[in-house]
Image (cartoon, rainbow, N blue to C red):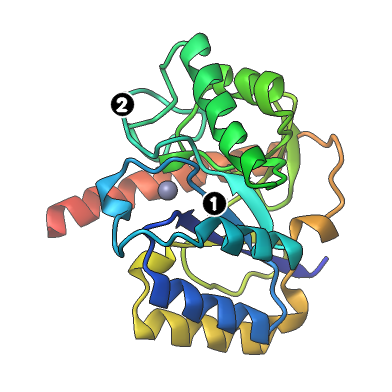
Amino acid sequence: MLSKYIIRLDDACPTMNRDNWKRIELLLNKYKVMPIVAVVPNNKDEKLIVDDINNNFWNDVKKWQNKNWEIALHGFEHKYVTKHKSIVPINDYSEFAGVSLEKQREKIREGMKIFQEHNIFCRVWIAPAHSFDKNTIKALREEANINIISDGIAWSPYYEHDMYWIPQQLWKPREMPFGTWTICYHPDEMKDKDFEILEDFLEKNSKKITSIDELTLNKKPKSLLEKSFEKIYWKLLEKKRQKDKKAS
Ligand SMILES: [Zn+2]
């Protein structure tokens, strides 16, 4: 089995860094990459206010969708309101995890309403800060008919909690011997060097870049080996965090 890569772009909203997003769009066009884009329906996160409001934003999202870019629901306001354990234990702050089912349903309903108003179709969930719980999954099913999550640790897509999971394991390009790897970018924060490294990677691996459309999703649970891999992954991440903490 050869390795495959999916590119994911996080935090699209009307106040995103327009130059950087334009730059990555041109780069992905050049290599015919169809990324997953995490779109915040109603941003209230000050960190995502980089440029003034782009009144044409939703037209741009529609244009992305028309070129088969996968538009994902990225929370509702991207504002962290709880400190709670997530199914994917990367961060301990959340817009969703620990919030009541009723409230979560409302956020997802409102988010999807905004997408629908702009004719955006959506079947993928990306939680802000990777943080959500079983009630989020229930709400996604009931309010949005979403059945795909871009998150989790494994080396191939799997089925869990009544959802298809496309794992997201990387934050910069890295050549892997096998498996399906999602590389997550935050274009707002990208520097020249990041664009160069990405272009190099796309140049070398253009045949290995895939999209959700091209994956075969089946109800295969995570294998035992992948479960062990996941455990080790979280341990290593924790270790790295401790080290970074000491260094800073
Ligand atoms: Zn985000």
Q: Is mark 1 within 8 Å of ligand 1?
A: yes
Residue 6: where, in percent of width, then height?
A: 66, 63
What residue lies at 51% left-to-right and 10% top-to-bottom? Answer: 102
Structural distance between the alpha carbons of marks 1 and 2: 19 Å
> Which amino acid lies under the numbered mark 2 shown in the image of this protein?
Val
Quarter of the C terminus within the rendering: bottom left
Q: Circle 2 sits in a helix, a strand or a loop, which is it? A: loop
What residue lies at 71% left-to-right and 33% top-to-bottom? Answer: 146
233 or 19: which is nearer to us? Answer: 19
**Is mark 1 in CB contact (under 8 Å) with mark 2?**
no
Residue 95: where, in percent of width, then height?
A: 39, 30
Q: Which residue is mark 1?
A: 38
Q: Quadrant of residue 108?
A: top right
Q: Is mark 2 within 8 Å of ligand 1?
A: no
Residue 158: where, in percent of width, then height?
A: 75, 40
Q: Is residue 108 above or below residue 53?
A: above
Quarter of the N terminus within the rendering: bottom right
What residue lies at 57% left-to-right and 83% top-to-bottom? Answer: 27
Q: Which residue is mark 2?
A: 81
Q: Residues within 10 Å of mark 1 (few under 14, many from 20)?
A: many
116 or 203: which is nearer to us? Answer: 116
Q: Quadrant of residue 15?
A: bottom left
Q: Is residue 22 above or below residue 102?
A: below
Q: Is residue 153 visible?
A: no
What residue lies at 52% left-to-right and 43% top-to-bottom? Answer: 74
